[in-house]
Image: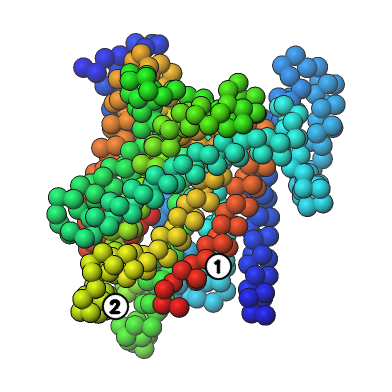
Amino acid sequence: MNAAAYLIRRLGGAAVVLAAVSFVTFAVFFLIPVDPARLAAGKTATPTAIAQVRAALGLDRPWYDQYGLYLRKLVLHGSLGYSYNTRQPVREIVFAAAPVTISLVAGAFLIWLALGVCLGTLAALRPRSFADRAATGFAAAAASVHPVWLSLAAAWLVGFKLGWTPISGYCSISGGGGYGCGGLAAWASHLVLPWCVLGLLQSALYVRLVRASVRETLSADWVRTARAKGLPERQILTRHVLLPVLAPLVTVAGLDLALLLGGVVFVETVFGLPGLGYQAVQSLRGFDLPTIEGIVIYATLIIVVCNLLVDLGVQRLDPRR
Amino acid sequence: MLGADSSLGRDELLRLLYGGRASLEVAFGATLLGLAIALLLGASAGFLGGILDTVVSRLQEITMALPVLLLVIALAATGGERLNQVAVGELIPPGVVTLVVVLGLFSWFYPARIIRAVALGLRSREFVEAARSLGSSETRIIRVHVLPHLAGPLAVYAAFIFAQTILLEAGLSYLGLGIQPPTPSWGNMLAVGAADYLSQPWLILWPGLAVFVTCLAVGAVGEQLRRRYSPEEPVR
């Protein structure tokens, strides 16, 4: 019964967060001195046409009315409204962009996890050695480099000078989605570079995190006991050192994944990947409120769900239980 | 020395130096604003407790679930339409105020949590009790006995927020949402260079390198400060 109460409390909290975030995003757009109706009606529209568009989009009503209507549609029909600029349903835009972002983040996740665990453990096992200094130096550099810069540099070097990969663009696995190409190989070749860039950037935090937690666990009582029992060093490392490190790693990785799945703005923009971050920037340029609102709500929803999953999962991971 | 940019033939080195001014102004301002909010909310929540503490803690829980980057970009784009007009002559070019406000508003979450925890621990320490029993006013206790203890964690976070803000400023200006051209900043120099980066890669080399070296330096300072003051957790 306790678990059900916990779940209800968490879901209630999630609803509050979603309402707050959608409200803030909505409110922000009423700060701008730009008239969305004028943008939506086109460049050569007459004042009456603009007034018609304004009425059709509901922009002539007070903002709290518009927000109420938006929320009602969202809750009752799961509808995120229609884009001001393309008249497409926002849900379709989000669902078309989400797979791109997921493809990018999933590949990068494997890279940053592998880099983080390997370099972090290596550094922790031999403190103050060359490997340790190299790993911490790598982490400091990866935390300081700008995503845009690294993306551009990678695209220039690997994509242009060496010609190993495409410079930008996206291909879906199925060939659908109107990207003009398809197949697993095309998908992967377009994503290799973004994967590596995002993976490198993200790994900075993980190298530090793994290094710190492994060093801490190495001096724990149970490791000393395992050594005293004469267990092989390899078994001590995997069973007694790395297993306890998993819990903090999953916590941080879950939150990071959630943040990135809502859109990887800079890497997507440079590599021309039409994911959520790219889409968000595009619609902001056109002051397309419904699309932005939709992407923000989707991103928040992912974060809320991931937070919940992480909190439930981490309890099971603790080997002391 | 570093050549000129492609479209207008402006001197790259000069723009790099002036761009540094805009970028560092934003970083200073946003760090100050963020830390001021963090100190105000964190210290009062931790030290005074009560309803204030509940409100601040709930607020922090909500911020945990914010898609921060998306909101920062949205705010910079929409708020920028108004705030970009605020400029003080040569000293504060258009766009700086926008970025300071937006980035400052989104950088207090983590430091506020740490400061709250430290202040909470201080509340029941002997020297605070002693000061109270001697009849010191609350303001005096906070000023003389609490604030000096918060200086360490604040300094640590100052360095990390500073580095973060430089990266974010460059990102936002790259998207055209930050410092407005023709005023150079490291971010919008990246944008200028990115337009033609395959044929003229050196135009993105220098602003990127400037961001990298600055962040690396600030990060190193932050790391030293952290070792000295708060070794408990790795700073994000």
**Quadrant where the image shows the N terminus of chain B:** top left
Q: Which mark is residue A256?
A: none
Element at badge 1?
Answer: helix
The reply, left or right, for residue A241 in relation to residue A107 is left
Q: Secondary structure at mark 2?
A: helix
**Residue at the disc numbered 1:** A312
> Which of the 4 quarters of the picture holds residue A201?
top left
Q: Chain of mark 1?
A: A
Relative image position of residue A188 (x, y in whole percent): 48, 32
Residue located farthest toward the left when viewing the structure as drawn: A129
Q: Residue at x 33, y 18 (%)?
A: A161
Distance between the Cα atoms at labels 2 and 1? Answer: 25 Å
Residue depicted at x 36% and y 41%: A200
- Mark 2 burial class by Cα count in 10 Å: few <14, some 14-19, many 20+: some
Subunit ID for the residue under disc 2 = A
Measured as percent of width and height from the top left, residue A34 is found at 67, 30
Location of residue A286 with respect to B162 vertically, above or below: above
Categorize mark 1 by other alpha carbons within 10 Å: few (<14), some (14-19), many (20+).
Answer: few
Residue found at x 36% / y 49%: A114
Residue linked to disc 2: A222
Marks 2 and 1 in Cβ contact (< 8 Å): no
In the displayed structure, would residue B105 be above or below residue A275?
below
Which sits in the foreground, B16 or B71? B71
Residue A199 percent location from the top left of the image: 39, 42
Q: What type is the residue that disc 2 sits on?
A: Trp
Quarter occupied by the C terminus of chain B:
bottom left
